[in-house]
Amino acid sequence: MAVLPVPGWQLQPSAEQIPLSTNYITNFNFLNQYLPDTYEKEFERYGNRTVASFLRMVGAEMPSNSDQVRWAEQGRLHTKYVDCTTAAALAANTATFTVNDPNVTAIAIRPGQTVMVSDNATGAANKAIVTAIDVALGTFDVAYYEAAGQSVAGAGATFTVWIYGSEFRKGTNGMQGSLEAEDEFFENSPIIIKDRYAVSGSDMAQIGWVEVTTENGATGYLWYLKSEHETRLRFEDYLETAMLEAVPAEAGSGAATQVVNTQVGDKGSEGVFHVVNNRGNVWGAGFPTLLADFDTIVARLDRQGAIEENVLFVNRDFSFAIDDMLATLNGYVAGGSANSASFGLFDNDTEMALNLGFSGFRRGYDFYKSDWKYLNDPTMRGGLSPWAAGATTANVITGMLVPAGSTTVYDQILGKNAKRPFLHVRYRASETEDRRYKTWITGSAGGAATSDLDAMEVNFLSERCVCTLGANNFFLFREGI
């Protein structure tokens, strides 16, 4: 049996820039002798409608006093090149290799170092010692330790070369040259996020018959209070979702070149999804539903930062897929593996309430699972869920793996190395101005007396950006390639 598409869920927003007719009583007809039964309290049919929680769980907030946030991330400690070529023939005792790896300005190989040389196609390998280098040309000469010489012909082949040590003769000079540490530098720019709610003084004096409430616990019979509270909650959600979804405005794009409205922004920012999609790891084949799939993920994490503990923030389908994968390891499940195990206490007694979900597992690393409401909410990314027709595209994000803990970076404000969460928000602030979360009231109603406008205007503002440190340790799970 499948869930029928009709009736579905309502996506029409209740927030408008004009008063809704449903918000006010329009029929004050007392000639009708019958009094209807009324439920005075508003029914919360959608439960908690907010989606913000992710960054509060995994990140932190800290001030910044610049239009740009920059940080440095460590490079690799050891030297390895994966695109090296040589014209040396099969069984040659010596060879000259050219390093063709991108973004290599000066090779970090020096005479006297011992290297492993492996053919990328066949895996055939030799060990050799470096005899000479030419930094300008990006080449180095080697002499093989094996009497049989080079194990494959160099013509048309590419090689991987990495350093594993060095060897020198007695009474010789030290190592020629030295190496300088090279960092990768990243940056992001804060964006200004705004919202506003306005209500006239007359409407503020209008009582309603429905008792309204919001997720933050505010209750009352004044509709403008409900609308103001919902505006505040909506703004707080946008503070998080903007940090997730923001993208930089590319040169020549419509956002960067538009002149129709000079009030709106034109630069964008690098959100978490954008950064991980470009600098992190991406799983683009639906859900990893087999242990072999997670073995592939673990193998990639081994090649990255090898963070011991990781949290999987997933949508409902992905969460069920993980539960089903782990459940098949149970000997009581049909098709259980040869190494089946019985989960739970008391041998899963039939009188015991059965928990069909898993909160985590260990496979090389510790993986903890958490449902992500943002990916399930139909008014947000939940509307792009894989069950939608034709939704097998790279835009459908089903989850993200976030490393737990913190990393060390150089903080320009502190002027020293500091521990920072892998994900954290930087907001603009100084001794006189704090733009983390600003709200102020203008007009002449509601206690404000700033102008002759017969209304109350509640303004919201924040200026912030998100820093995704060590994006190579994150995994983005997409439905499509």
Image: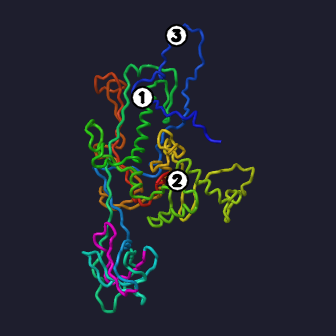
Q: Amino acid at mark 3?
A: Asn
Q: Which residue is mark 3?
A: 29
For residue 264, what is the image quadrant?
top left
Q: Residue 182 in the image: x percent, y percent?
A: 31, 67
Q: Residue lying furthest top in this view?
A: 31
The three-letter amino acid code for the residue at tag 2 is Gly
Which residue is drawn at the image coordinates 29% and 51% (left, top)? 68
Q: Which residues are magenta?
A: 91-119
Query: Which label sits in the foreground, 2 or 1?
Result: 2
Q: Is residue 458 left or right of residue 451?
A: right
Disc 2: which residue: 286
Q: Quadrant of residue 35?
A: top right
Q: Position of residue 426 (x, y in %)?
A: 35, 50
Place of residue 466 in the rendered image (x, y in percent of width and height, measured from the top left)? 37, 50
Is label 3 or label 1 in front? Answer: 1
Point out the tag, 2 or 3, that comes first from the N-terminus. 3
SS label for mark 2? loop
Q: Identify whether 172 is placed above or below 110.
A: below
**Residue toward you, 463 or 273:** 273
135 up-or-down from 358: above or below: below
Q: Which residue is mark 1?
A: 16
Residue 15 shown left or right of residue 47 in the figure: left
Location of residue 39 (image quadrant): top right
- Please tell me which residue is depicted at 33% across the width and 84% down the height of the picture: 112
